[in-house]
Image (cartoon, coloured by chain):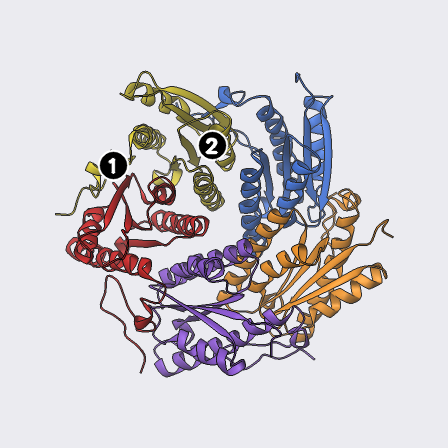
Chain colours: A yellow, B red, C purple, D blue, E orange
Amino acid sequence: MFSQMVKIGIADTCFARVNMGEVAKAAALEYDSGVEIERYTVPGFKDLPVACKKLFEEYSCDVVVALGWVGKEDIDETCAHEANIGLIQCELMCSKHILKVFFHEKEALGDLDRQSEICKDRVQKHTVNALKLVEGKEVLSSWAGEGKRQGYTDAGKIK
Amino acid sequence: MFSQMVKIGIADTCFARVNMGEVAKAAALEYDSGVEIERYTVPGFKDLPVACKKLFEEYSCDVVVALGWVGKEDIDETCAHEANIGLIQCELMCSKHILKVFFHEKEALGDLDRQSEICKDRVQKHTVNALKLVEGKEVLSSWAGEGKRQGYTDAGKIK
Amino acid sequence: MFSQMVKIGIADTCFARVNMGEVAKAAALEYDSGVEIERYTVPGFKDLPVACKKLFEEYSCDVVVALGWVGKEDIDETCAHEANIGLIQCELMCSKHILKVFFHEKEALGDLDRQSEICKDRVQKHTVNALKLVEGKEVLSSWAGEGKRQGYTDAGKIK
Amino acid sequence: MFSQMVKIGIADTCFARVNMGEVAKAAALEYDSGVEIERYTVPGFKDLPVACKKLFEEYSCDVVVALGWVGKEDIDETCAHEANIGLIQCELMCSKHILKVFFHEKEALGDLDRQSEICKDRVQKHTVNALKLVEGKEVLSSWAGEGKRQGYTDAGKIK
Amino acid sequence: MFSQMVKIGIADTCFARVNMGEVAKAAALEYDSGVEIERYTVPGFKDLPVACKKLFEEYSCDVVVALGWVGKEDIDETCAHEANIGLIQCELMCSKHILKVFFHEKEALGDLDRQSEICKDRVQKHTVNALKLVEGKEVLSSWAGEGKRQGYTDAGKIK
């Protein structure tokens, strides 16, 4: 599928309650069996920004998926905000894309099956998005304005 | 209209429910049929900052319009805040303007026609603003303090 | 008044409902008729940070007044917060002062005359502050701890 | 345990009500008796980011644990947010991990024994995490998605 | 007390209702009569970050105390947040400590004597902290975890 080898970084956490890294790995290989993968596991999602920086600098990744699981407390949401600011800052420093894939427990409070389901769907779709972004800046343009959603069904385009 | 060729970057998303990129493209060409356009489509608006950076660095754009559609949930507003911090940071790193064009669903909750209308008006006006900024730093000075609005009618100058 | 020529940048917006740029220009010339002025008008206050950066880099300004008018909605306050973070970041990148002069509609909700009055007073006082900062780091020290206010009467020193 | 000498930085505060630095020191030595340690004590947790930067730049640490104790007031939470943004920014500037170990008084309001207990458990576990991160990017991968918690019992993996 | 000359920067504001700069100056000289002092007065506390940067770059200060007085309105708290983010960013850019000394009016609403008292105590203690930080990274370690407070009596260590 790619004219040259693509390397995707997968950064995940011990805090998550689903093995998001394995889900991403499987999705990447299903999309392109020849893709190279670098895994980086950190304690919590606030450790993701520098892990992504190292995946770019030390492991020459072309793109990274940063996988975070956000607890239900207010402090968790604040931490997610801090992590996202750091991830965007890292993208700007490296001029490469990081797909910021966060599942928030409050999306399905108390329903563990649904939590797992939303989380996996989001990881899978964004892993494919990551690989498409490497292919070119207009590869996703056919989906522009289509109301695409990850973790849920698409909202769709307004007629 | 321009003494030399101008290149505008148009960064849009798959998350949006209106094809904001196409609206911007049409508005740019209507303002100046000779303008060069580079399109970049990303999954969601948090992916816009690095896309803009690449439009400046890799595609030599003179200015970029970053087009975001913000969902109605609190988390969407938080993400929009993160994206805007990143977009301003990108402008400072590159010393070039990015017009930060965000439509928020809560501006017209549940009224899809009105959402589309506000969104398109904002994209059109800011695309023209982007091209005017490239023409010179005082091109917009005749409108200074005039209470200009995008998406709505102007608030006007206080007499 | 200055041993060498001083150049002040005046960055203002089309969003404002008062021509803050003209108010600043008059105040600067009243303080020092020989001051050089560079005007830069942008659509909204989130466009001010990079305009200030360009005023320093491309127009060699010694100091800039960044003039913003903040609407009454929550989203406007969020945007003002983003702009201010960017303006401070710009100051740190350039090692030069930007006077961050923002009028908020909620300071005098619905009273347009009072809005205009507060806004103009703040612009005038901060334009003078900007020029004093260029004169030297202890020029304002005689006012230190004096409870100075812009837009309102001074709070004064606690006896 | 390490093929080459590892140096861990321990940054703590006078504001804390538990000697978090000593707890970290003991945990590091228990994990690896040969580890080198650099201690840096600052007044409050907002002073931690630059202390970490100096531990990397001037003391050549491989990793740092930044230990903060957050008071119960809203202003303390805001300060913690500012400190965390700074710590992540420092990680990105230095491309090295800082474990951001913050105890918040509101986790156990008024119960000093419980406060001390949560705090110590979190410091101990994250000190070990810090040393594991230096060993390699996949050392923690066997715990990925396991719902690991510091200060509390693990949430565990969703079946 | 110091083996070589130490230079402290004192950055204060005209907004404050107490001459915090003079309080810091007296405290610095009382701690070490030979210390060198550079004063920098700005209009408001959002002007402090770049003043600190200039105190490091243009005046070769070893450390700076940034002295801010925060009004009682919500907008003042937001501005304090912006200033603190900028001050931490400045510390990271310069790899030097800035003691961020902010008094908030809401700590003693309406009681001017108490406001002055808290403010002065905080300035005095943090000026000494600043000079101790220059002496070495473990000078404050004997106070680590002691629950030190500035502006109030110490919270103390948890037994």
Foreground residue among A124 and A97: A97
The Cα atoms of the two marked residues, 2 and 1, are separated by 24 Å
Which of the 4 image quadrants contains residue B148? Answer: bottom left
What type is the residue that disc 1 sits on? Answer: Glu
Residue at position x 53%, y 58% in the image: C91
Is label 2 in a helix, a strand or a loop?
A: helix
Residue A124 left/right relative to E37: left
Mark 2: few/some/many CA within 10 Å (<14, 14-19, 20+): many
> Residue C35: percent from the left, percent from the top?
51, 75
Foreground residue among D31 and B40: B40
**Residue carrying label 2:** A52
Which of the 4 image quadrants contains residue A18? Answer: top left
Residue C12 left/right relative to E134: left
> Residue B103: percent from the left, percent from the top?
27, 54
Q: Mark 2 lies on which chain?
A: A
Which of the 4 image quadrants contains residue A2? Answer: top left
Is there any visible trace of residue B70 in the rendered image?
A: no
Mark 1: few/some/many CA within 10 Å (<14, 14-19, 20+): some
Residue at position x 49%, y 36% in the image: A49
Q: If you read the primary sequence from the N terminus, does the residue marked by circle 2 or circle 1 appear first? A: 2
**Residue carrying label 1:** A138
Q: Quarter holding the N terminus of chain A?
A: top left
